[in-house]
Amino acid sequence: MDFVVDAIKKEYKPGTRIKLIHMSDDIHPIPDGMLGTVDHVDDMGTVHVNWDNGRYLGVVLDEDEIEVVS
């Protein structure tokens, strides 16, 4: 599992800009298409994001879909 988390940390470094494709399981999901900036990836592989709408919420890659933007 550590190698998976290491790969996630390598791809989603702090400051990386991302776009949410879809968030599947949150009571108040971030809207599809929202942009954000990666804050950090924790040891469970959750990508914590400062979203452009002012929210701070983690993304679970097994459940949610994001992509890196330039």
Image (cartoon, rainbow, N blue to C red):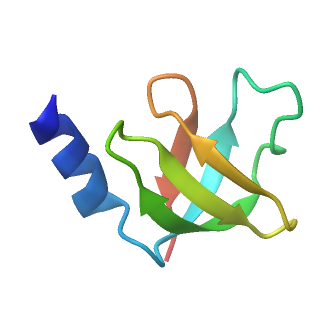
* Residue furthest to the left: 3
Image quadrant assignment for residue 19? bottom right
List x then y, in percent, for residue 15: 48, 78
Position of 4 compared to 56: left or right?
Answer: left
List x then y, in percent, for residue 21: 64, 42
**Quadrant, the N terminus:** top left
Q: Residue at x 57, y 41 (%)?
A: 59
Position of 35 compared to 59: left or right?
Answer: right
Vertically, is 54 above or below 34? below
Q: Residue at x 46, y 73 (%)?
A: 16
Most foreground residue, 68 or 44: 44
List x then y, in percent, for residue 47: 48, 50
Position of 20 compared to 5: left or right?
Answer: right
Tag count:
0
Q: Residue at x 68, y 66 (%)?
A: 50
Q: Residue at x 55, y 54 (%)?
A: 48
Vertically, is 54 above or below 11? below
Image quadrant assignment for residue 40? bottom left
* Residue furthest to the front: 43
Position of 43 compared to 4: left or right?
Answer: right
